[in-house]
Image (spheres, rainbow, N blue to C red):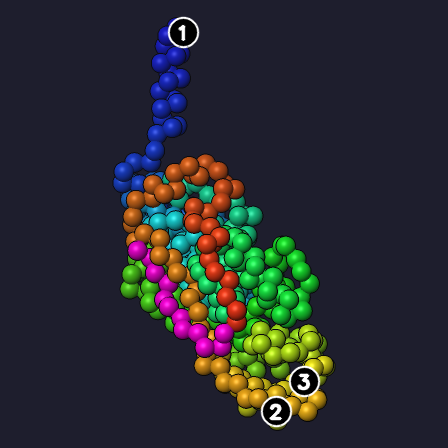
């Protein structure tokens, strides 16, 4: 009797410890009507899609449709901030940072809005924690925007290394934000203002991540902007804000461009209205005439409060390398890289920390390289 119990216990241990079958698949199902989804990983190709559809329906989805089926790899699902309605997902990618970064970029472009990771999972169905997803997202936004404003060189890997921290410290000092070791959404908002707003960020992500990777990720990436936010230029967005927020945003932009302007500016007025993109910005140090071209570039004329020569500065479009994922393997690659963290929902992303990245001074003449996945 004891021998039979020992054999049974051994069989159970082997069954629970066994890896997913070689043909294990990940499937994702989505309902645009309910903006709901379901995913299943580690199932056969016959079972995975129906499993995902079942979870989609349990999440209040109607008319749930299969959108992705992938072998191996990591996947992520992402939703847009209200009031935009958008969803993106990917699977079969080589590491969690690659999966989250591609899904975030695709969702932001589809929504014209902030997007946030809802789930990150591997081929066996093991997931990253909510806190891990949130930490990755904030760091990814900060790294991407710090690169685009010239403060950071390196990858958007979602890891808060020393180079990212140093670049944040420099940015905060330049724009008058209090020194802080933590990263919050207010800092991301300021970085977005320094990059000339959401429409410009969307344009950069589309140009440097989404469009270059579209052909490579067909069948591995899905995005649906069900109800995107209207696209507005930075100038149009500024007019829609409160007066104090508008003055803070323009002072932040000028400070990040190397001008002296205490945040918030004393006054900021469109000339004659937002349609021209021309602003008169009165700062404690100088008065500025700022021409926002609508594509992230600007011309800044300094009207000094003390006698000095006027200065005109033309920025040739903000550019930098947003997250060069050179170590990311191609879709469908073996997900062995996830070993060691498959059962730890709070484990850090399996990517190289950015401690070797180089903090860079702001430079208005930057060129942007596309993001790669090998």
Query: At x 36% / y 26%, what residue is drawn?
Result: 15
- Foreground mark, 1 or 2, reads 2
Q: Mainly helix, strand or loop, the magenta region?
A: loop
Instruction: State left or right for residue 294 relative to residue 288.
Output: left
Nearer the N terminus, badge 1 or badge 2? Answer: 1
Magenta segment includes 373: yes
Of 120 and 257, nearer the camera is 257
Q: Disc 1 on helix, strand or loop?
A: helix
Q: Disc 2 on helix, strand or loop?
A: loop
Q: Which residues are magenta?
A: 363-374
Q: Are marks 1 and 3 in contact (CB under 8 Å)?
A: no
- Foreground mark, 1 or 3, reads 3
- Is 196 placed above or below 37 here? below
Residue topped by disc 2: 309
Residue topped by disc 1: 2
- Is 166 placed above or below 96 here? below
Q: Which numbered circle lies on residue 353?
A: none
Q: Is residue 189 visible?
A: no
Distance from the alpha carbon under mark 1 to that under mark 3: 87 Å
User: In x, y percent, where is residue 9?
Assistant: 40, 17
Q: Which numbered circle lies on residue 286?
A: 3
Q: Disc 3 on helix, strand or loop?
A: strand
Instruction: State left or right for residue 266 relative to residue 62.
Output: right
Query: At x 39% / y 49%, what residue is drawn?
Result: 95
Of 59 and 253, nearer the camera is 253
């Amino acid at each position: 009797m004891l021998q039979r119990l020992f054999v049974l216990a051994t069989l159970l241990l082997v069954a629970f410890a066994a890896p997913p079958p070689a043909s294990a698949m990940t499937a994702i199902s989505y309902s645009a009507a309910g903006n709901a989804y379901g995913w299943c990983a580690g199932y056969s190709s016959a079972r995975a899609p129906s499993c995902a559809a079942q979870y989609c329906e349990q999440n209040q989805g109607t008319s749930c449709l299969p959108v992705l089926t992938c072998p191996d790899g990591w996947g992520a699902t992402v939703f847009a901030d209200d009031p935009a309605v958008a969803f993106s997902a990917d699977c079969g990618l080589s590491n969690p940072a690659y999966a989250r970064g591609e899904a975030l970029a695709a969702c932001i472009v589809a929504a014209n809005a902030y997007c946030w990771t809802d789930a990150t999972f591997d081929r066996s169905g093991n997931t990253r924690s909510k806190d891990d997803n949130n930490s990755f997202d904030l760091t990814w936004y900060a790294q991407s925007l710090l690169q685009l404003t010239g403060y950071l060189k390196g990858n958007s890997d979602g890891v808060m290394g020393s180079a990212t921290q140093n670049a944040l410290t420099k940015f905060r000092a330049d724009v008058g934000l209090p020194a802080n070791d933590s990263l919050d959404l207010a800092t991301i908002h300021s970085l977005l203002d320094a990059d000339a707003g959401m429409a410009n960020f969307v344009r950069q992500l589309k140009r440097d991540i989404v469009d270059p990777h579209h052909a490579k990720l067909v069948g591995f990436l899905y995005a649906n902007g069900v109800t995107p936010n209207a696209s507005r230029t930075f100038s149009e967005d500024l007019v829609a804000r409160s007066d104090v927020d508008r003055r803070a945003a323009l002072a932040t932009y000028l400070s990040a461009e190397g001008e002296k302007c205490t945040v918030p500016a004393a006054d900021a007025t469109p000339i004659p209205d937002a349609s021209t993109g021309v602003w008169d910005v009165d700062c404690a140090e100088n008065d500025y005439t700022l021409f926002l071209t609508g594509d992230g570039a600007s011309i800044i004329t300094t009207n000094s409060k003390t006698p000095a020569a006027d200065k005109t500065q033309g920025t040739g479009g903000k550019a930098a390398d947003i997250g060069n994922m050179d170590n990311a393997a191609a879709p469908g690659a073996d997900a062995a890289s996830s070993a060691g963290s498959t059962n730890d929902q709070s484990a850090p992303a399996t990517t190289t920390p950015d401690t070797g990245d180089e903090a860079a001074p702001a430079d208005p003449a930057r060129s942007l390289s596309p993001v790669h996945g090998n």
